[in-house]
């Protein structure tokens, strides 16, 4: 391509635009693009390779290679130079392609005679769609201007692919966003839901990647950037005096919005023939590529801000997005990359299900989804690329699977599953008001875990006998600023009232590790799970703990109060925390506030060390609650948040069960009330084994109470205990199989 690249690439884009405006079938369009590009770039070959599936690329159109190879030649991701471009997302520019490492020629294409190779990825906002290649016989490296021109063609191709322009009669490729796709993720919250996609951040579709008049486009861009700046300034004004973290983010937004480099790069792209939208998207794509390579988390966050800003700018330019007042579909299923707990709460109970592309099982969004009992799948890779607003989607929270645009057989199977679950729900409803008394005569107290106002209706519906664990930190996590004492007191009073005299065990603030308050300066710790968290923070900086204890005492308003401390690892911590409670009571007495009729103070048992604490500890605590989530992570040294190891060790491993038996034994010796409140308490088989080894109180998410009670009422704990002891005697590592065999045989 001759030097004056700006006008040359504009000419090329102009020709592309004319071509796009013509009526043509999909394949014919692709064919014309390759011949036009080869002609403009002065190369003998131009080819388009598109993904057939995640691992395979297919030659879909070519100028210069043998025509019979089209739709025949395929290569795997990483194979040859084309595969290398596809895998790495990076350009390959070589004067002597056959000498490049990994070069592999496809004899059926006749490409062996070409020496130079320039390949660029076809991608849209980080989503890989294929590879665009030019080749020539002459040995030469392509210039930066030529590379630019090819990248722009690739970008236009990506936009057009999104628009489905190559689909239809003589289709060059499968239609996008029309095929059924199954996403295999991870369970965040069990349950099933059927509904329609509601994208938390709708995809912006750019219908006009190429523009006729750069001046108009530049003006549109400048106006949109101005609107964006005003909006960011407004947001900043609104946020002043509030939360500093949010202010910092907005300051960063403003810095980007005013950045000359950002605007200049986009204007350059417009000068070369792109529309304002396409220029924003091109800049956004390269920011995303940079983002993927930045090792520093802080910088990555800042680039993420830029990504968000580009989205806002695109919405302003295209008039698409949330601000357009699009209506939520019937039975909305929320699809998002990730979502914060407060944003999720804003949707209230409208959502039928949630599928997150990222997210994690322990994230706050997952906690909120659980409180709202909304089926949730996390780690559904690429779902935000595939799903469109209004698409039919089935969420199988039990299996961690989502079926997007399912076919009829999948829908039928899913309907069967929903019907079966409805039947089970009816069964659970019929035992809701009965005690969980086993066949061998033991009655197990089943309470629920809670932490949000959204949990409270479940107190009634689930048959819970009170709240065994109220995670007070959730109220802190969903806010932008530290709640005030009066606010907390009102909230706790509300919870106690909703419990109608049943016991509510309030756990003091358990922050640190995965639970980071948005308005507290994060401490940079090498290993937060083993770091400054929970009661360690509460004792070192007692201000918040004291405020919270005071709020709890006031909320009790002369009634009974149960409080427990999280993450106590040794006697001394318990003693100091208990002393804080005594001091708080004394202070309230002096101030003339009514004291609770009875104060019951206990501790979580979440570190193995505490199981071996002195007798004095077991005698002093009024109750203990085993936090199985943390206890298990420290027992097996396996991070509860890490997908690679999270499921590696079974709760029914006999080492762990034997350890839990020791805790039961120690509590029995000192007559200490004991319960179990980790996630395992809500899994029927695990709950049964816990009851069999002596736990008489289990606290779980409300939806688990029915299934756990149902199994307990049909079981003989002595027999289950015998199975556990038998497995231990015969040297088994884990008792799951033996218990499952027993359950199968006893149900026959
Ligand atoms: C636990 O660790 O088991 C527990 C109940 O506490 P959390 O899950 O809030 O850490
Ligand atoms: Mg814990």
Image (cartoon, grey):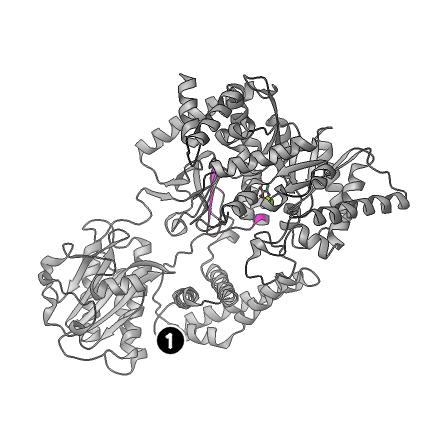
User: Where does the magenta region start and end?
Assistant: 327-341
Q: Is residue 43 visible?
A: no
Say which quarter of the image contains residue 437. Answer: top right
Q: Position of residue 561 (x, y in %)?
A: 76, 36
- Residue 604 location, x and y as percent? 65, 41
**Residue drawn at point x = 79 percent, y = 41 percent:** 553
Q: Is the residue 611 above or below the residue 70 in the image?
A: above
Determine whether, in the image, residue 230 is placed left or right of residue 11: right
Q: Secondary structure at mark 1?
A: helix
Report the residue marked by disc 1. Answer: 271
Residue 18 position in % (x across, y down)? 26, 65
Overall secondary structure of the magenta section: loop
Badge 1, how many Cα within 10 Å: few under 14, some, many 20+?
many
Please name the residue shown 55% across and 58% down the image.
527
Q: In the picture, residue 289 is in which quadrant?
A: bottom left
Q: Is residue 99 above or below residue 33?
A: below
């Amino acid at each position: 391509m001759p030097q004056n690249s700006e006008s040359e690439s504009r000419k090329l884009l102009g020709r592309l635009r004319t071509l796009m405006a013509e009526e043509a079938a999909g394949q014919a369009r692709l064919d014309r693009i390759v011949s036009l590009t080869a002609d403009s770039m002065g190369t003998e070959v131009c080819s388009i390779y598109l993904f057939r599936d995640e691992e395979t690329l297919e030659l879909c159109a070519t100028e210069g290679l043998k025509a019979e190879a089209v739709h025949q030649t395929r290569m795997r991701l990483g194979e040859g130079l084309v595969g290398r471009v596809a895998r790495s997302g990076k350009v390959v520019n070589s004067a002597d392609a056959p000498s490049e490492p990994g070069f592999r020629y496809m004899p059926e294409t006749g490409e062996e005679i070409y020496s130079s190779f320039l390949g660029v990825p076809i991608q849209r906002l980080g989503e890989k769609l294929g590879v665009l290649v030019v080749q020539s016989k002459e040995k030469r490296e392509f210039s930066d201007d030529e590379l630019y021109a090819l990248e722009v063609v690739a970008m236009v191709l990506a936009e057009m692919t999104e628009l489905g322009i190559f689909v239809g009669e003589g289709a060059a490729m499968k239609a996008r966003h029309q095929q059924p796709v199954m996403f295999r993720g991870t369970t965040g919250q069990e349950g099933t839901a059927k509904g329609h996609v509601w994208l938390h951040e709708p995809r912006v579709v750019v219908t006009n990647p190429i523009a006729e008049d750069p001046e108009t486009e530049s003006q549109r861009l400048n106006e949109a950037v101005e609107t964006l700046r005003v909006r960011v300034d407004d947001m900043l004004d609104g946020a002043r005096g509030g939360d500093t973290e949010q202010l910092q983010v907005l300051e960063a937004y403003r810095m980007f919005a005013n950045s000359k480099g950002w605007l200049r790069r986009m204007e350059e792209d417009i000068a070369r023939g792109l529309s304002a939208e396409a220029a924003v998207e091109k800049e956004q794509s390269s920011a995303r590529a940079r983002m993927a390579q930045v090792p520093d988390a802080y910088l990555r966050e800042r680039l993420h801000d830029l990504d968000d800003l580009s989205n806002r700018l695109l919405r302003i330019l295209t008039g698409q997005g949330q601000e357009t007042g699009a209506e939520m579909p019937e039975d909305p299923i929320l699809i998002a990359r990730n979502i914060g707990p407060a944003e999720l709460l804003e949707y209230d109970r409208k959502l039928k299900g949630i599928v997150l592309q990222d997210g994690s099982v322990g994230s706050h969004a997952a906690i909120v989804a659980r409180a709202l009992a909304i089926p949730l799948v996390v780690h559904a890779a690429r779902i935000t690329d595939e799903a469109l607003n209004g698409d039919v989607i089935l969420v199988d929270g039990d299996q961690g699977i989502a079926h997007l645009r399912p076919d009829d057989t999948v829908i039928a199977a899913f309907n069967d599953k929903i019907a079966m679950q409805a039947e089970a729900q009816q069964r659970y409803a019929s035992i809701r008001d009965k005690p969980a008394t086993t066949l061998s005569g033991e009655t197990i107290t089943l309470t629920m875990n809670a932490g949000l106002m959204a949990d409270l209706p479940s107190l009634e519906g689930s048959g819970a006998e009170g709240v065994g664990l109220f995670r007070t930190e959730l109220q802190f996590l969903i806010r932008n600023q530290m709640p005030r004492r009066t606010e907390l007191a009102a909230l706790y009073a509300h919870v106690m009232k909703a419990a109608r005299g049943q016991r509510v065990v309030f756990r003091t603030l358990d922050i640190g590790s995965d639970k980071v308050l948005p308005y507290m300066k994060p401490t940079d710790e090498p290993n937060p799970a083993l770091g400054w968290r929970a009661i360690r923070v509460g004792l070192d900086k007692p201000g918040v703990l004291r405020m919270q204890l005071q709020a709890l005492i006031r909320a009790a308003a002369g009634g009974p109060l149960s409080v427990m401390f999280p993450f106590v690892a040794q006697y001394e911590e318990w003693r100091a925390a208990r002393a804080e409670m005594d001091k708080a009571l004394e202070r309230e007495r002096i101030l003339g506030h009514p004291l609770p009729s009875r104060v019951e103070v206990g501790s979580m048992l979440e570190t193995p060390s505490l199981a071996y604490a002195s007798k004095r500890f077991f005698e002093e605590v009024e109750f203990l609650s085993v936090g199985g989530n943390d206890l298990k992570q420290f027992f097996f040294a396996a991070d509860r948040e890490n997908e690679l190891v999270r499921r590696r060790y079974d709760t029914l491993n006999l080492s762990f069960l034997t350890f839990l038996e020791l805790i039961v034994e120690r509590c029995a010796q000192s007559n200490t009330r004991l319960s179990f409140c980790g996630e395992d308490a809500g899994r029927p088989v695990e709950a049964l084994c816990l009851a069999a080894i002596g736990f008489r109180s289990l606290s779980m998410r409300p939806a688990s109470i029915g299934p756990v009670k149902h199994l307990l009422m049909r079981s003989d704990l002595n027999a289950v205990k015998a199975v556990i002891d038998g497995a231990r005697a015969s040297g088994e590592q884990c008792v799951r199989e033996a218990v499952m065999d027993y359950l199968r045989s006893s149900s026959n």
